[in-house]
Structure formats: structure tokens, C-alpha cells
């Protein structure tokens, strides 16, 4: 029986080439698996392409609901962002795709899993680590790390020699990845960081901010324990809520990010990300946390958020540390329930009010009018104790400056006093010896 290999199949140029390449170089059956995480795709056409290209079977796994609930929401609740800008659209999807590949490999009794990630990118790490964590016995095949093809042109020639149509509609197109959460764009003018992105040519679900309506739009989001559950007063499940926010945010130019990021493999890359719905949700969630979390918890959670972002970006989803951070985050979200209203206007988001049954904002304390819970006189003692290190240091510095500015006469006076003190010490010592003899 021939060896079976499960391939992460998108129907794009790379994976179209990989099917015949695997069959020629591995003498195997290729099981193509398409993982639907909300990308715009004609799955029937893609399945047909896989079969005509030589796949023994092609499956489509619809995991949008799982993607939202088990991957996007944990990242959102954590406030995980990579390098201050990137909302981890591709990064959150890859561990789930790896999980699905392993599941199909088990069902098909496959010996290996293959993917089309390149040796320069982050995705190879995310796929490999996900598969290693869930199925260390499976072989991982990444053709871009071993074959002799060096470019898209080489791939097109490879298919042409085998009379296989190349799934390329534009010679000059961006390298794109899309799912329910975002769309990424790389290549063309973006490869020179000094170039301004050509948004008119590039953007898919978002209008350029200057093209957005001249009138602001208001959105209200309701959260329960950190999870969005309603939009503008209407209860919604996660995928529908994100889709609707993508439309609203996209129409108002929200969520466009141009970033030069540090890849895990050590190089810098530039990309433009469209994350309209996600950007709104991150902003609203943070506004609610400002109401519901105490200072120490919020401060530590900010540190956890940065680490969470690094772990997700680096493909370390299935690790004890990521799971521990998620457990901590979940405990903080117990009180993060309420409603947040935001204003969207030409690419910007601003707060328009928030409320929560667990709000720590106390009008009696916050008001300029003195309430029963606060006595202004208490502030003096608090500030003196709180600032004691500042006071002690200041006194020490003052003493040092005073010694350095002492005049010569003062020094002479001090010397005379020292001599007098020395004489007194000698007299006392003599008296002590006399008393001892007696």
C-alpha cells in the first residue's frame, strides 16, 4: 500500500505544484485538506482542482466557529498584539489548521503531513510546532525547504510541463492571506519600506480612510466575561458578529495597519493588514477593562498580553506557558461584562461611553465633590509615606551639596573644632588611666 500524505491545501500556486511533486518524489497518495477559517474561497472549484491535479481525495473542514471561540476570543481577551500593531490574524489560524491536519492524518492513517510554507516565513514554524505538539510521530514535509524550484516562475513552468493549469490570474499580485479575522498583503511596492502603500490598488474589505463617509458611525458592543455577545443590541454568535463588524469597520476605513515586523526566522518583513472588525473589538474590550479591572491586575495583564502576542506569533500555541497565560486571562475576565459604545470616523475609533454592572468607577470617589468615602486630609500622610524614598534621596542630595559648598573659613572652623574635640578626648583618656591605677 502506498504511503499517504495529508497536505494543507489552499488551491493556490504552491499547493497546486506540491500535489504532483509529492507524487513524483514520494511515490504516495496525497490527501488534500482545505481548512475553512473564513477565507473567501470557492471550495467546490478548489476541490475539483485538487482532484484533477492528482489528489486521491480532497476534504473541506469548516472550523470557523472553533476558530472564533477557541483561538480568536482567547487572543482578544488577553489583548494579545505583536509589536504594537499586528492583531495576529494569520498567527491565530495556523495552530488550528495544524490541529485539523493531524486529525485527518489520523483518520486516513497517513504517515506524514505536508504544507506549502516557505523557508523564509513564520508559517513553517507555526505549522511544524503545531504538528510536533499534537503528533510527534508524524513526518513533516515542507517542499519549499527541499525542492529546486526557486520562484513563482519556476512553479508555473513546472505545471506547464505537466499540462496542469496554473491557478494564477494576475502576474503582478500581492501575496495575500485572508480569514474571518483579517487580510494580509505583502510584496510589490511594500518590499521597499520607503514606499507608501497603494491602498486604492490593494485594499479588499476596507476603504482608505479619506474615502470613508464624512459622518461618524456609532457602534455598541456588549461583552460577557470578555467575550463579545451582542452588536447594537442584537445578540449574535461570534462569526456573525465579526462579519458584521468587518463590514461596518471596513466602510469607515478602520483597522488598516502598515507594519515592518520582526519575523521569527530573524529577518524583517513589511506587510499591510486589514482587520476592521478585530480593531473595533480590541478597542472596545480595552475600554471595558479600564472600568472593570483594578490597577494591579490591569498592569500585570498588560505584561501577559505582550508575552501572549509573542507566543502566538512564534507558533507556540500548544505550550504550557500559553495555556497558563490563558488561564490567568480567563480569571481576570470574570468581571469584564458590560456595554461599550464607540465612534468610528475616517479610520479612527474613539470612546463614546461604557457601562458595566462590575464597574469599579465610584462617583463618590471620583467626583470633585467630597463624598463619605474620601477625606482630603488623609492624602497628606499617604503622600508622605508613598514618597518617602523621594524625600530621603532629596535630603541626602541636599546634604552632599551643602558639604561641597562649604567655605574655607567654615573648613578652618571645622578643623579647629576637630582639634578641640581631639584634646578633650586625650584629657578624658588620661583621666581614665589615672582612675584605673587607683
Image: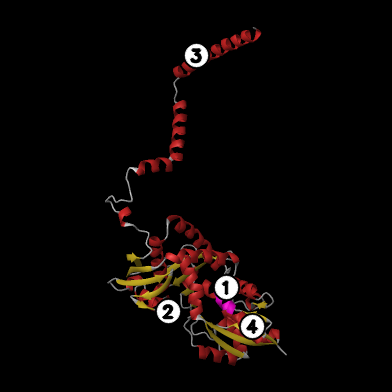
Residue 407 higher or lower than 336, as above or below: above
The N terminus - image quarter: bottom right
The location of residue 58, given as percent across then percent down, is 58, 89
Query: Are circles 2 and 1 on residues that touch, CB within 8 Å?
Result: no
Q: Which mark is residue 57?
A: none
Asked if marks 4 and 3 touch (Cβ < 8 Å), the reply is no
Kindly identify which residue carries mark 2: 237
From which residue to which does the magenta span run? 94-99
Instruction: Please tell me in which quadrant of the rendered image residue 23 appears.
Output: bottom right
Q: Which mark is residue 416?
A: 3
Whichever of labels 2 and 4 marks the residue nearer the N terminus, that label is 4
Sequence-first tag of 3 and 1: 1
Image quarter (top left, top right, bottom left or bottom right) of the C terminus: top right
Identity of the residue drawn at 35% across and 67% down: 348
Instruction: Work out whether 293 lies above or below 128.
Output: above
Residue at the spot of label 4 = 105
Q: Residues within 10 Å of mark 4 (few under 14, many from 20)?
A: many
Identified at 48% across, 74% down, the residue is 184
Please state the horizontal and vertical placement of residue 241, each as a whole percent of the image.
40, 77
- Viewer-nearest of discs 3 and 2: 2
Q: Along the polypeptide, which appears first: circle 2 or circle 1? A: 1
- Residue 49 drawn at (x, y percent): 56, 90
Amino acid at each position: 500500500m502506498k504511503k499517504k500524505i495529508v497536505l494543507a491545501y489552499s488551491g493556490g500556486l504552491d499547493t497546486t505544484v506540491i500535489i504532483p511533486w509529492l507524487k513524483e518524489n514520494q511515490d504516495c497518495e496525497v490527501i488534500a485538506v482545505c481548512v475553512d477559517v473564513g477565507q473567501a474561497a470557492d471550495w467546490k472549484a478548489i476541490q475539483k482542482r485538487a482532484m484533477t491535479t492528482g489528489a486521491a481525495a480532497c476534504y473541506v473542514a469548516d472550523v470557523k466557529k472553533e476558530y472564533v471561540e477557541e483561538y480568536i476570543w482567547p487572543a482578544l481577551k488577553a489583548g494579545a498584539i505583536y509589536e504594537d500593531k499586528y492583531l495576529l490574524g494569520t498567527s491565530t489560524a495556523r495552530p488550528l489548521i495544524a490541529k485539523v491536519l493531524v486529525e485527518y492524518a489520523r483518520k486516513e492513517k497517513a504517515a506524514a503531513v505536508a504544507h506549502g510554507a516557505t523557508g523564509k516565513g513564520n508559517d513553517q514554524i507555526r505549522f511544524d510546532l503545531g504538528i510536533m505538539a499534537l503528533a510527534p510521530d508524524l513526518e513533516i514535509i515542507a517542499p519549499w525547504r527541499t525542492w529546486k524550484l526557486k520562484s513563482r516562475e519556476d512553479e508555473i513552468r513546472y505545471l506547464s510541463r505537466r499540462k496542469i493549469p496554473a491557478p494564477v490570474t494576475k502576474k503582478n499580485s500581492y501575496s495575500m492571506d485572508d480569514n474571518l479575522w483579517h487580510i494580509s498583503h505583502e510584496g510589490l511596492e511594500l518590499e521597499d519600506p520607503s514606499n507608501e502603500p497603494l491602498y486604492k490598488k490593494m485594499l479588499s474589505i476596507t476603504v482608505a480612510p479619506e474615502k470613508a463617509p464624512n459622518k461618524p458611525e456609532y457602534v455598541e458592543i456588549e461583552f460577557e466575561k470578555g467575550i463579545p455577545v451582542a452588536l447594537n443590541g442584537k445578540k449574535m454568535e461570534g462569526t456573525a458578529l465579526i462579519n458584521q463588524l468587518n463590514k461596518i469597520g471596513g466602510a469607515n476605513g478602520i483597522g488598516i495597519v502598515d507594519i515592518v515586523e520582526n519575523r521569527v526566522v530573524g529577518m524583517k518583513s513589511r506587510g499591510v493588514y486589514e482587520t476592521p472588525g478585530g480593531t473595533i473589538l480590541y478597542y472596545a474590550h480595552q475600554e471595558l477593562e479600564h472600568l472593570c479591572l483594578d490597577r494591579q491586575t490591569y498592569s500585570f495583564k498588560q505584561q501577559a498580553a505582550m508575552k501572549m502576542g509573542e507566543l502566538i506569533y512564534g507558533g507556540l500555541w500548544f505550550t504550557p506557558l500559553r495555556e497558563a497565560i490563558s488561564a490567568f486571562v480567563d480569571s481576570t475576565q470574570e468581571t469584564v461584562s458590560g456595554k461599550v459604545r464607540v465612534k468610528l470616523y475616517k479610520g479612527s475609533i474613539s470612546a463614546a461611553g461604557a457601562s458595566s454592572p462590575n464597574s469599579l468607577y465610584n462617583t463618590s470617589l471620583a467626583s470633585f465633590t467630597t463624598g463619605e468615602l474620601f477625606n482630603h486630609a488623609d492624602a497628606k500622610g499617604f503622600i508622605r509615606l508613598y514618597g518617602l524614598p523621594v524625600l530621603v534621596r532629596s535630603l541626602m542630595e541636599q546634604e552632599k551639596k551643602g558639604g561641597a559648598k562649604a567655605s574655607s573659613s567654615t573648613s578652618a572652623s571645622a578643623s579647629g573644632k576637630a582639634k578641640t574635640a581631639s584634646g578633650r578626648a586625650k584629657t578624658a583618656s588620661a583621666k581614665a588611666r589615672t582612675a584605673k591605677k587607683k
